[in-house]
């Protein structure tokens, strides 16, 4: 077995034996010469998230093999994407505005009416949440399981409604702030979002099923800071599954999304309906949006979605006596006490503190039980080893092992350099400069 694993580590062997090879367009561009020299051969290309790829980058994966006898062996090219969501990111404002580089080849082909297959059923979100963005798609319906599975029909425990746009007034006399140019933050929304996440954890929601999203990098950093300060060191609460910006979260999803819109003076770049569609379509079961309601309700471009949000109150309505999970249907009234309306950030934070203290003994007991079950499972899977039978590692063997590990790590770093460089890039749109001549220093 060891010999086979050793052989398959070699790049040329992997490429010649593998039936499916996955890579990013950026990686393909950086490693094209190497792949061609290795004799890379393929007949089909499937390009996912094609609407987010620059037009010039789209052609690079087509050029990773030398033609045979003057003929390209590529037989099929499948592009999968959604031109109603965010386009490729072009940081240079001139290229973006005057060269149309923001248009992907996928969007160009759709615009030119090239025959395409449009999917008209969604299976990600409960039907009530899907209504928020169905108006952007022609005849978009739901797959059968959305109307049949209990997870889509049951209510979100502790909440009166499956989604809400929650009006967050000024906190300590402040709404949005800008500590540095184009670095937008809103402390009131950050505190509210973390308190709401904590409330869900107290009710029993799994941390990994909750993501906190925002529309600006500055707010994402603030959310991490607040969450680390209030939740990270507490094993009963912990960090949420993800804290990210809407732009970077495109292509991902989670059961429950808490979304901070940040802006209180003007609409900001959520005016781009494509960004709104991404923001509203990340949630499967619950979506709770924090923002200055009037600012977003008055935006003409967002009217179809805001009309649906208007069905529910502007203040968060919770059911603190209903633990997770619940068998209550989403359109049924709770029998576990009267609903409670949250007035503002201060009210939410004070309530969550008292709610936490009141539930602390039960949470500790549940935590101890879970830890004991985990330790027992580990004991069964990994029985204790007789230490007298273990070989004692000499200092020389330890040095050789550590040197080998360092060498392997360096080789891996070198091979993955392109992917690392790609992941570290900032894929956020820049807010337009107030003065055109002044160069943008930081992305929003």
Image (tube, rainbow, N blue to C red):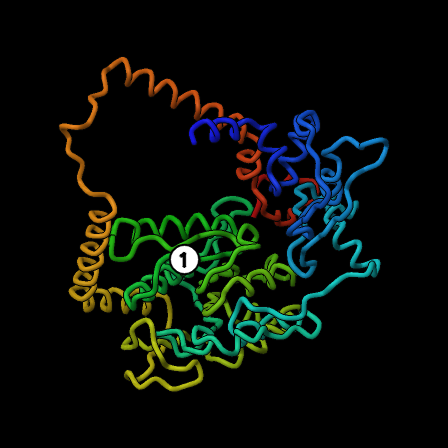
User: From the viewer's perspective, is 35 left or right of 196?
Assistant: right
Please indicate, yes or no, whether residue 172 appears anywhere in the rendered image: no
Which residue sits at x=46%, y=69%?
285
Question: Picture coordinates of residue 443 (x, y %)?
Answer: 57, 44
User: Which residue was labeled with disc 1?
Assistant: 190
289 and 282: which one is in front?
282
353 and 108: which one is in front?
108
Which residue sits at x=54%, y=39%?
423
292 and 19: which one is in front?
19
Please indicate, yes or no, whether residue 47 appears anywhere in the rendered image: yes
- Count of picture labels: 1
Residue 43, picture quadrant: top right
Image quarter of the N terminus: top left
Question: Picture coordinates of residue 367 (x, y %)?
Answer: 21, 59
Question: Picture coordinates of residue 397 (x, y %)?
Answer: 28, 16
Residue 400, picture quadrant: top left
């Amino acid at each position: 077995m060891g010999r086979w694993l050793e052989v398959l580590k070699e790049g040329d062997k992997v490429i010649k034996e593998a039936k499916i090879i996955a890579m990013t367009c950026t990686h393909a561009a950086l490693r094209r010469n190497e792949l061609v020299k290795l004799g890379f051969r393929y007949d089909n290309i499937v390009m996912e998230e094609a609407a987010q790829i620059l037009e010039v980058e789209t052609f690079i994966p087509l050029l990773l093999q030398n033609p045979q006898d003057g003929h390209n062996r590529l037989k099929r090219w499948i592009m999968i994407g959604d031109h109603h969501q965010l386009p490729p990111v072009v940081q240079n404002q001139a290229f973006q505005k005057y060269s149309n580089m923001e248009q992907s080849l996928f969007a160009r082909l759709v615009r030119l009416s090239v025959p395409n297959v449009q999917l008209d059923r969604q299976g990600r979100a409960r039907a009530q949440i899907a209504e928020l963005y169905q108006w952007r798609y022609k005849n978009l319906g739901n797959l059968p399981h959305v109307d049949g599975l209990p997870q889509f029909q049951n209510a979100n425990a502790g909440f009166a409604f499956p989604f809400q746009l929650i009006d967050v007034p000024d906190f300590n006399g402040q709404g949005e702030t800008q500590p540095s140019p184009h670095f937008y933050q809103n402390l009131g929304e950050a505190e509210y979002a973390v308190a709401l996440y904590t409330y869900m954890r107290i009710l029993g929601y799994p941390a990994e099923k909750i993501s906190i999203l925002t529309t600006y990098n500055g707010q994402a950093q603030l959310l991490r800071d607040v969450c680390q300060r209030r939740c990270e060191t507490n094993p009963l609460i912990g960090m949420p599954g993800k804290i990210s910006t809407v732009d970077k979260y495109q292509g991902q999803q989670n059961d429950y999304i808490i979304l901070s819109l940040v802006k209180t003076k003007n609409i900001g770049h959520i005016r781009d309906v494509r960004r709104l569609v991404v923001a509203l379509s990340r949630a499967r079961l619950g979506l709770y949006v924090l923002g200055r309601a009037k600012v977003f309700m008055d935006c003409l471009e967002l009217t179809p979605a805001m009309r649906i949000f208007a069905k529910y109150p502007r203040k968060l309505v919770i059911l603190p006596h209903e633990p997770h999970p619940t068998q209550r249907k989403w359109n049924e009234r709770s029998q576990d006490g009267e609903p409670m309306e949250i007035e503002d950030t201060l009210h939410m934070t004070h309530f969550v503190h008292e709610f936490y203290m009141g539930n602390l003994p039960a949470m500790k007991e549940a935590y101890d039980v879970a830890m004991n079950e985990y330790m027992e499972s580990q004991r069964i899977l990994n029985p204790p080893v007789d230490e007298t039978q273990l070989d004692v590692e000499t200092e020389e063997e330890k040095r050789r092992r550590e040197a080998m590990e360092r060498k392997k790590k360096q080789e891996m770093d070198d091979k993955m350099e392109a992917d690392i460089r790609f992941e570290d890039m900032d894929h956020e749109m820049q807010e337009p400069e107030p003065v055109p001549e002044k160069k943008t220093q930081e992305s929003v």
